[in-house]
Image: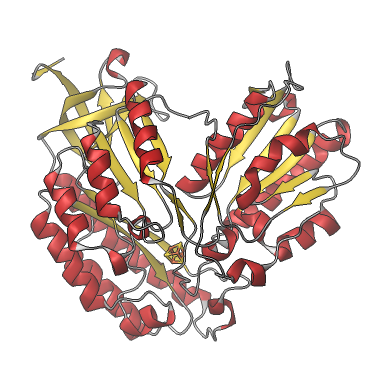
Amino acid sequence: MHLPNLDEAKKRTSKNNIYKNLTENYPKAYVGKKYFLRTYGCQMNVHDSEAIRGYLEMLGMENTTNIEEATVIVLNTCAIRENARDKVIGFLGKCKYLKKNHPDIKIVIAGCMSEQPDVIDDIMKNHKYVDIVVGTHNLDDLPKLLLKDLKKQEIEVFSNSDEVIEGFNYVRDSKIAAWVNIMFGCDKFCTYCIVPYTRGRERSRKLENIIEEVKSLKRDGYKEVTLLGQNVNAYGKDIGTSFSTLLEEVAKTGIERIRFVTSHPWNFTDEMINVIAKYKNIMPYIHLPIQSGSNNILKKMNRRYTKEEYLELFNKMKKKIPNVAITTDIIVGFPGESDEDFEETLDVVEKCQFDGAYTFIFSKREGTPAALMKDNTSIATKEKRLQRLNELVNYYSNKSNQKLLHKVVEVLILGESEKDSKKLYGYTDTMKLVNVEGSKDIIGKIVKVKITDAKSFSLDGKYLEEGVEV
Ligand code: SF4
């Protein structure tokens, strides 16, 4: 048994990555059995779930969306906000009931929550029916644990790792657009964030391995890749290369669409901007979290830039990258945020007129410095601020979408719309969601669409065949 340890997780003792290639094959001990997998949180977790599916299917299992028929239930969890954690704990109630009636099923917890000592305490004391817990650094232990004759709860969470794992047998959600991890971990230690503890130090994959993965996805017919990291523009610092070099090499593979998330404003270089502007297959869309417009709060958050520096970078991107769309993240009600600080945030939104923003009320994460900061602002005040912010953010995202009304745009069609089975959905180069009228044979293609309606969060459009409405 290995238990998580936040002090261990904080340590950045080594700079040497250990590159590990997964070569193991496992016996198909679960043929005829099914698994149910639920994913919480960010794109990194969504992609980790594709690795988890790879392991489960290697053992012979099939996916099910009906939890009642599952032999293995996996919750791939998120620790970034309290409500993500509450959702997992809530869902465990259902798992407990299932386990009571079917003692043979196995319940697994993976993901960032596993790395938090207080969560593990709670699981050990109050959720003894959970069979296996694996950490983010040792996901590759999951098949071994599932093959064990479990006599007791198995908790295997390694809080610190230098490993960069290659060779995951991903079972991807899409055959059109793929996630590609380029690095793991984060060294920024923003004071509100648990990720540097749950995901460890920044470790880059080798450039040649990433390029090989993109080429192989292209050969398999993928149209789009999204390069993935907690802080992609720190890519390569540990191995003597850079994100701009990687981006250029990925562009040269000729894959039709390239995206990347997430960028930190602090080390977004001119070279990166130049490469994005130079290659048509790098999409003109950047998610650039600002978090607050107040220099006072940015300092408390340890974000390493000022409002003025952010605006300078933002304006440079707008000037140099044709037609670029920029979205952001904003936290409201960080400890000590005054009315004046909040007005600074509204001012940034007015100045940047973001294409969209993810807005949140500050959520205290145990073990982070911000959890110990004095916070005198009432929840009612924070909610009012969030409401004002959302009104402004929505106004500008609607304004940005209105600019596309009656225009013809290129959309990569990803599938049938979940809300309306008669429609398809896809994204523009600038990452705007479009619900499209058209036949299913355009799924997987980049097609011309005429925009017929523009709302705050999505667009409606009609597929144009050879420029003609159908
Ligand atoms: S850059 Fe900051 S917010 Fe982003 S993952 Fe790292 S510590 Fe968290």
Q: Image height check: is 407 above or below 334?
A: above
Residue 431 in sight: no
Q: Is residue 368 visible?
A: yes
Residue 407 image position (x, y, % from top left): 9, 35
Residue 41 pos. (x, y %): 52, 50
Q: Nearer the viewer, residue 9 or 454?
A: 9
Q: How is the image coloured?
A: secondary structure
Where residue 470 sits, quadrant-wise, is top left
Q: How many marks?
A: 0
Q: Residue at x 28, y 78 (%)?
A: 306
Eyeballing the image, is 21 above or below 363? Answer: above
Q: Position of residue 152 (x, y in %)?
A: 89, 45
Residue 313 image position (x, y, % from top left):
19, 67
In the image, taking residue 348 as reference, residue 58 lies left or right, namely right
Q: Quadrant of residue 86?
A: bottom right
* Figure quarter occupied by ligand 1: bottom left
Residue farthest toward the right in the current orientation of the protein: 151
Is 186 located above or below residue 107 in the figure?
below
Residue 184, above or below 210: below
Instruction: Give the residue displayed 35% in from the left and 76% down from the top.
Output: 304
Image-based side of 380 in relation to 239, left or right: right
Q: Quadrant of the N terminus?
A: bottom right
Q: Is residue 142 left or right of residue 239?
A: right
Q: Is residue 340 left or right of residue 40?
A: left
Q: Residue at left 51%, top 79%?
A: 378
